[in-house]
Image (cartoon, rainbow, N blue to C red):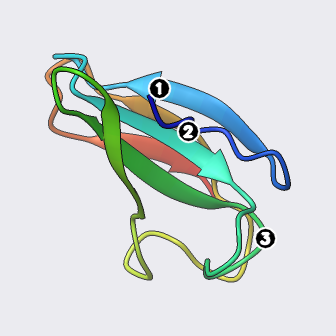
Amino acid sequence: MESINTPAHNERGPAFSRDGRYLYLSSDRPGGEGGYDLYVARWSGEDWVEVASLGPAVNGAADEGGPAVSADGDRLYFSS
């Protein structure tokens, strides 16, 4: 199983999608838009895969954090 956490960087504020197939988190890993950015990992049924930035439409120069998924699963709330 590939670790979502990285030893050289910080991850915080994990939040699962309603169906448990997606994990949203804030991380300061390199390649982001700002200090802390939001990322998503997908559960394949066996492992967490495709840890990817949510990109510049969500992430900006400020820190993004505290992801929370709405009860109906249609919205992602976060601070910036």
Residue occupied by mark 3 = 35
- Image quarter hosting the N terminus: top left
What amino acid type is highlighted by mark number 2? Ile
Query: Picture coordinates of residue 16 (x, y %)?
Result: 37, 23
Secondary element under disc 2, as helix, strand or loop, is loop
Vertical arrangement, residue 69 with respect to residue 4, above or below: above
> From the viewer's perspective, is the residue at label 2 or at label 3 nearer?
2
What amino acid type is highlighted by mark number 1? Ala
Residue occupied by mark 2 = 4
Mark before the other along the chain sequence, 2 or 3: 2
Query: Picture coordinates of residue 22 (x, y %)?
Result: 28, 33
Residue 15 is marked as 1
Q: Residues within 10 Å of mark 1 (few under 14, many from 20)?
A: some
Vertical arrangement, residue 65 with respect to residue 52, above or below: above
What amino acid type is highlighted by mark number 3? Gly
Vertical arrangement, residue 2 with respect to residue 26, above or below: above
Q: Residues within 10 Å of mark 3 (few under 14, many from 20)?
A: some
Residue drawn where x is 59% and y is 79% of the image: 60
Mark before the other along the chain sequence, 2 or 1: 2
Query: Picture coordinates of residue 26 (x, y %)?
Result: 63, 48
- Spatial CA distance of label 2 from label 1 is 13 Å
Q: Quadrant of residue 72?
A: top left
Pick the front one: 24 or 2: 2
Query: Picture coordinates of residue 28 (x, y %)?
Result: 75, 61
- Spatial CA distance of label 3 from label 1 is 19 Å
Secondary element under disc 1, as helix, strand or loop, is strand
Vertical arrangement, residue 18 with respect to residue 66, above or below: above
Question: Could you tell me if the residues under marks 3 and 1 are in contact, i.e. CB atoms within 8 Å?
Answer: no
Left or right of 74 on screen, residue 13: right
Left or right of 34 on screen, residue 72: left
Secondary element under disc 3, as helix, strand or loop, is loop
